[in-house]
Structure formats: structure tokens, C-alpha cells
Image (cartoon, rainbow, N blue to C red):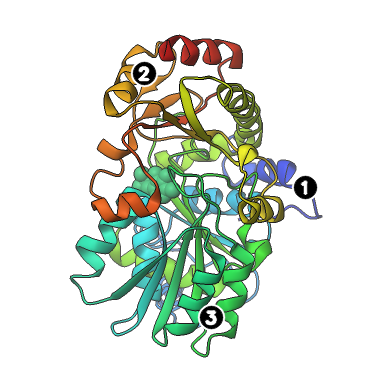
């Protein structure tokens, strides 16, 4: 697909890369290519396209092989992937999937092998945690968890796992907002004799406020359902890397799993990319104002939010790897579950729903919803309590939201 002829900044690249109107009767916006199959330019071109996709031969520089079949690749996925790359500092290639979970599962299947192990930070997104317990472990993959934010513990765990193939970090963690040092883990995997890969789930602060590839992570994973999509109306996932070979491997598996993002969803997501920075900056400013005000409210025991960190190691990691605190915070209320439920019931602007990153404010009770499958031990270790409420702040006016939260607390 088209490349802009000279270097431009990400905000420009996202609107100029990937799509050439001349290929689509001058259409200013990309069309949706809903075809499931593609007509070959010749039988020889078909043979060559298959040989390239099966990895039997390598394409020439700038060669554009014929498209084959939409499960393998299609123009809307190519356009979207080309436009995602400039948003992720350090990336050269991207692969899109039909959900964040599909992206995570494909990374696990692509880079774990039987007899080798996965190390992950705890807490993880609930779905990822279930996937590990209900699918990976029964399949015989060895897994091991370390507390998020424990830099020494993660270093030691990496050194001590001879069979390590993949390290998965989620930072900041959900719903506790604990940050994990990406650069330290990246240097530990590089010292390891079997050179495991480091993948970072960057859904909570990326692509705008945190850049894992700059800190030498190998793979960045997104639930694009969240900030990239931004309007709570589509499911999508993405993986980016500085190494195109890693992405190529994922695309190969994606063709077999059948979990490529469909053309319509690619088109919708593609139209959201140019506003992701604008939305995230507004949402982060809103959240920071609200979180810092709520921290002084006597009905609240604690606000978990990066600008309110008190632990010196957390402050160090925050300052080293994030630009802004983001738009998700968690509240610990005085009282127990009933107080948290009453707060959710009384909200009028914020809505009681899971998910995050959309332009509308959402609030949920992690213990009984997103993290309800965690054991007592895992909940205690992660610090997820009965009185905890997680809030994803949208683009509404922050004073209206603060009033809504304050009213719901009284
Ligand atoms: C939502 C989410 C996922 C899963 O993404 P889906 O698009 O819902 O499949 C993974 N990781 C994090 C951090 C998430 O917030």
C-alpha cells in the first residue's frame, strides 16, 4: 500500500499512510472491501502469492503480491495496520485481530512451545487470566505469576526459569493501577540464555502515553476495543513490533485461526485513529482533576491513580515510562460491598458497565465482575477489595462528572 514519500509526524502519518485514493476511483476515505476472495492477475501470480504466504519464497523489496482470500489478508486490514504503525513509537509492523483476546491468544500460541513456560504479572485482565488457567495450563504449558510492580521479583523469576519462552506484562495493572518496569524486564530477557520474548499489554495507557517498544519490549498488545476504538461500539485487537518477522509469524497463525479483523471493523477503527490522542489527552486531564479532588473526600479511603502514587518505586517507574496518568482510576470506599454497590446504583452520568477507554464514563465493581474468577489468595495478593470501584473517565465535562461522583457518595 502507499507510503508517504518523506518523513512526517505520527498525527500526519496516521492520515496519509496506508491508503492511496488513486487505487479507489479517487475516494478520499478508504472504501470497505467486503470481498472474501480476490481475482488473481494471472495463474503465475497466484502461484507466487501462495508461495510467499506459505513462506516458501520471500517477496522482492516493494513487491505487492496478489491478494488471495480475506482470512489471510484484505485491503482494509492492510490499510489499518499501516496506519497503526506510526502511532506506536518504535514499531515497524502491526497485525490486527478480531478482539484483544484473539491478539493475546495468538501471541501465546505463536511464541510458547510445549515444555517452555510463560511468566506473567499479577493481576492481569480477567479474560487473560482465565485463558491461562482454563486453556494454556490444561494444554500443558507451564505458567508462573509474579506481582505487578515487583522489579526485583520479576528479574529473579526471569533468571530462575530455564524454560522461559514468553513474559507478559500488563502495566499499569487493572484495576489496581500498579506499574511494572518494562525496561528492567526487557534487559532481563536479553540476559537470559534462551532469550524469551517480552510482550506488554499496553491497553491502559497506549498508544499515547506509554511506549513499550522504546523500552525494548518485543511485542505490544492492544485491546483496540478500548481507547483505539474509543466509542464502545466495536471489538478489535492489535499487536505491534519493531521486528517484522514476529508480526509475520502472528499473521501466519491468524490465517489458520481465522481471527483477522473483518473489513467493516477495520474501516471503523481506521476512522478512529486520528482522534485517539485528542480523546486520550482530554480523558486523562478529566480523570486527573477528578481523582485528585476525590482523594480529599472523607467518604473515600484511597484513590488508586498514577498522579497520586506515594510508593517511591511506583513513582520511579511512572516517571521513567509514562507521559500522562491516563483516564482509569479505582476508588476504595469506606465500608464494604454494599457501599460500593450503592455508589454504582446512584451514578447518573457514569454508567455501571465493564470495559474502559470510551468517550462515555463507565464504572464497575471488579471483585464481583471483571475479576470474579480470581481466588481469595489472588484477590488479596492483587489488593482487589470489596469496597473497590473502577472508573473509566470519558470526555464529558469534568465538573459534571465530579458532581455526579460526589452526589453518589453522599
Ligand atoms: C479489554 C482488555 C483485554 C481484552 O480485549 P477484548 O477486546 O475485550 O478481547 C485485554 N487486556 C486488557 C488490559 C483489556 O482491558
User: Which quarter of the figure is the C terminus placed in?
Assistant: top left
Task: Give the CA separation, mark 1 to mark 2.
Answer: 43 Å
Circles 1 and 2: CB atoms closer than 8 Å: no
In primary-sequence order, the first of circles 2 and 3 is: 3
Q: Which of 115/253 is in front?
A: 115
In primary-sequence order, the first of circles 1 and 2 is: 1
- Secondary structure beneath dot 2 equals helix
Q: Residues within 10 Å of mark 1 (few under 14, many from 20)?
A: few
Q: Residues within 10 Å of mark 3 (few under 14, many from 20)?
A: few
Residue appearing at x 47%, y 53% in the figure: 238
Q: Name the residue that disc number 3 marks.
A: 58
In primary-sequence order, the first of circles 1 and 3 is: 1
- Secondary structure beneath dot 1 equals loop
Q: Residues within 10 Å of mark 2 (few under 14, many from 20)?
A: many
Vertical relation: 20 (above or below) 47: above
Is residue 260 visible in the rendered image? The answer is no
Q: Which of 93/161 is in front?
A: 161
Q: Name the residue that disc number 1 marks.
A: 9
Is residue 210 visible in the rendered image? The answer is yes
Residue appearing at x 59%, y 22% in the figure: 296
Q: Which mark is residue 343?
A: 2
**In terms of image quadrants, where is residue 307?**
top right
Circles 2 and 3: CB atoms closer than 8 Å: no
Which is closer to the viewer, label 1 or label 3? Answer: 1
Horizontal and vertical percent position of residue 325 = 63, 39
Q: Which of 155/21 is in front?
A: 155
User: Which quarter of the figure is the N terminus placed in?
Assistant: bottom right
Amino acid at each position: 500500500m502507499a507510503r508517504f514519500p518523506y518523513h512526517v509526524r505520527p498525527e500526519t502519518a496516521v492520515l496519509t499512510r496506508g491508503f492511496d485514493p488513486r487505487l479507489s476511483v479517487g475516494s478520499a476515505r478508504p472504501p470497505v472491501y467486503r470481498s472474501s476472495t480476490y481475482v488473481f492477475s494471472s495463474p503465475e501470480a497466484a502461484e507466487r502469492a501462495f508461495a510467499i504466504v506459505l513462506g516458501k519464497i520471500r517477496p522482492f523489496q516493494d513487491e505487492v503480491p496478489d491478494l488471495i482470500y480475506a482470512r489471510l489478508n484484505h485491503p482494509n486490514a492492510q490499510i489499518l495496520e499501516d496506519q497503526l504503525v506510526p502511532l506506536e513509537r518504535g514499531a515497524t509492523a502491526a497485525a490486527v485481530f478480531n478482539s484483544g483476546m484473539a491478539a493475546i491468544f495468538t501471541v501465546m500460541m505463536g511464541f510458547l512451545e510445549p515444555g517452555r513456560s510463560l511468566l506473567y504479572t499479577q493481576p492481569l485482565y480477567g479474560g487473560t487470566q482465565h485463558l491461562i488457567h482454563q486453556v494454556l495450563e490444561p494444554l500443558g504449558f507451564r505458567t508462573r505469576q509474579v506481582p505487578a510492580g515487583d522489579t526485583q521479583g520479576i528479574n529473579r523469576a526471569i533468571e530462575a526459569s530455564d524454560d522461559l519462552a514468553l513474559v507478559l506484562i500488563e502495566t499499569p495493572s487493572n484495576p489496581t493501577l500498579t506499574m511494572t518496569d518494562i525496561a528492567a524486564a526487557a534487559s532481563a530477557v536479553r540476559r537470559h540464555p534462551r532469550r524469551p520474548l517480552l510482550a506488554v499489554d499496553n491497553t491502559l495507557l497506549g498508544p499515547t502515553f506509554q511506549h513499550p517498544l522504546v523500552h525494548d519490549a518485543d511485542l505490544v498488545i492492544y485491546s483496540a476495543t478500548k481507547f483505539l476504538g474509543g466509542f464502545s461500539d466495536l471489538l478489535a485487537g492489535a499487536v505491534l513490533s519493531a521486528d517484522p518477522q514476529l508480526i509475520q509469524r502472528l499473521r501466519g497463525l491468524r490465517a489458520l485461526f481465522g481471527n483477522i479483523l473483518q473489513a467493516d471493523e477495520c474501516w471503523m477503527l481506521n476512522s478512529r485513529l486520528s482522534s485517539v490522542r485528542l480523546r486520550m489527552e482530554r480523558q486523562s486531564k478529566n480523570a486527573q482533576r477528578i481523582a485528585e479532588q476525590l482523594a480529599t473526600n472523607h467518604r473515600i479511603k484511597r484513590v488508586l491513580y498514577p498522579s497520586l502514587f506515594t510508593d517511591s518505586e511506583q513513582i520511579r517507574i511512572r516517571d521513567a515510562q509514562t507521559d500522562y496518568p491516563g483516564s482509569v482510576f479505582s476508588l476504595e470506599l469506606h465500608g464494604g460491598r454494599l457501599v460500593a454497590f450503592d455508589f454504582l446504583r446512584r451514578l447518573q452520568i457514569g454508567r455501571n458497565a465493564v470495559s474502559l477507554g470510551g468517550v462515555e464514563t463507565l464504572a464497575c465493581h471488579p471483585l464481583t465482575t471483571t475479576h470474579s474468577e480470581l481466588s481469595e489468595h489472588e484477590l488479596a495478593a492483587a489488593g482487589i477489595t470489596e469496597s473497590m470501584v473502577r472508573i473509566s473517565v470519558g470526555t464529558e465535562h469534568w465538573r459534571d462528572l465530579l458532581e455526579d461522583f460526589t452526589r453518589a457518595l453522599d
